Image: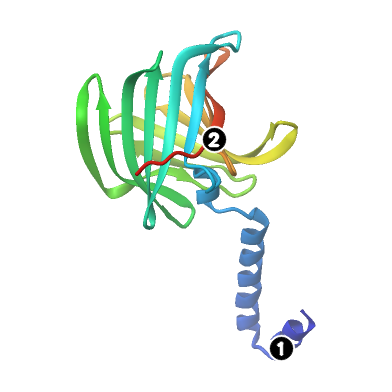
């Protein structure tokens, strides 16, 4: 450290300011410690996350959600499936890539009661998650295939999980023109998606709650 300070004494003032700005930026990145991928993708030991839908008392219902994370070169295929009493309701496979502080979706394949194996290519890619700075929420707009306009705001928070404080990104989604109701999603380092919930009319209801991580052969 002393060597670096000694060298900068002989650099013109303009260059000194540039060096200081670079050092400050590097320090901020180091303090954050994690990339956007660390929040969105679980620990690489696992490739499957399972969720349950609780009722108002917190008891499990017949609704289950599973998400598979399949690495494809620099991208990931995210296979998101919903079930009721072990019967499939819908499945969507999205291909995402990570650039800077963003998660971008480049294509999707959807099967649900309204469409079967519907393929969509997104050009430009759609931003589905952004990394905010501490104390500085960031907002962007996501236009769904249906034309629905989602206003999303992400912020850094901490959640207590099993008595341990974990870094998380909270994403609030407001559907344009749909009143005061909104949804929250929480992404936790090492877990990926932790919980999704709806908020409105003075109440908060959990849609899906994290259950467990596991590893399955997806080949």
The residue beneath circle 2 is: 213
User: Is 137 situated left or right of 142 in this image?
Assistant: right
Q: Identify the residue at image location x=54%, y=46%.
A: 45
Residue 116 image point, x, y percent: 20, 27
Residue 149: give x, y in percent of width and height. 34, 31
**Tag 1 residue:** 7
Give the vertical position of 116 relative to 214 (above or below). Answer: above
Residue sitting at x 32%, y 24%:
90
Nearest the viewer among 183 and 138 is 183
Q: Quadrant of residue 188?
A: top right
Q: Tell me if I can see residue 146 in this picture.
A: no
Viewer-side residue, 67 vs 138 = 67
Pointer 2: residues within 10 angstroms few (<14), some, or many (20+)?
many
Q: Position of residue 88 (x, y in %)?
A: 33, 20
Query: Tag 1, which secondary structure?
Result: helix
Kindly report the distance in space between the C-alpha atoms of the residues bearing marks 1 and 2: 50 Å
Q: Position of residue 161 (x, y in %)?
A: 68, 32
Q: Nearer the viewer, mark 1 or mark 2?
A: 2
Which quadrant is home to the N terminus?
bottom right
Q: Is residue 184 left or right of residue 149?
A: right
92 sits to left or right of 120: right
């Amino acid at each position: 450290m002393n060597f670096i300070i000694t060298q900068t004494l002989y650099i013109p003032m303009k260059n000194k300011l540039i060096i200081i700005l670079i050092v400050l930026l590097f320090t901020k990145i180091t303090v954050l410690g994690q990339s956007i991928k660390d929040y969105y993708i679980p620990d690489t030991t696992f490739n499957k996350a399972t969720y349950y839908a609780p009722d108002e008392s917190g008891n499990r219902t017949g609704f289950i959600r599973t998400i598979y994370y399949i690495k494809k070169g620099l991208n990931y295929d995210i296979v998101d499936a919903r079930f009721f009493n072990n019967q499939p309701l819908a499945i969507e496979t999205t291909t995402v890539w990570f650039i800077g502080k963003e998660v971008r979706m480049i294509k999707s394949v959807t099967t649900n009661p309204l469409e079967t194996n519907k393929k969509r290519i997104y050009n430009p890619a759609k931003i589905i998650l952004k990394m905010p700075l501490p104390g500085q929420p960031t907002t962007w707009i996501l236009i769904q295939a249906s034309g629905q306009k989602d206003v999303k705001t992400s912020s850094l928070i901490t959640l207590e999980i099993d008595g341990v404080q974990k870094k998380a990104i909270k994403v609030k989604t407001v559907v344009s023109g749909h009143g005061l109701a909104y949804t929250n999603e929480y992404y936790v380092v090492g877990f990926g998606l932790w919980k999704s919930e709806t908020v409105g009319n003075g109440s908060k209801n959990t849609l899906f709650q994290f259950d467990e991580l596991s590893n399955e052969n997806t080949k």
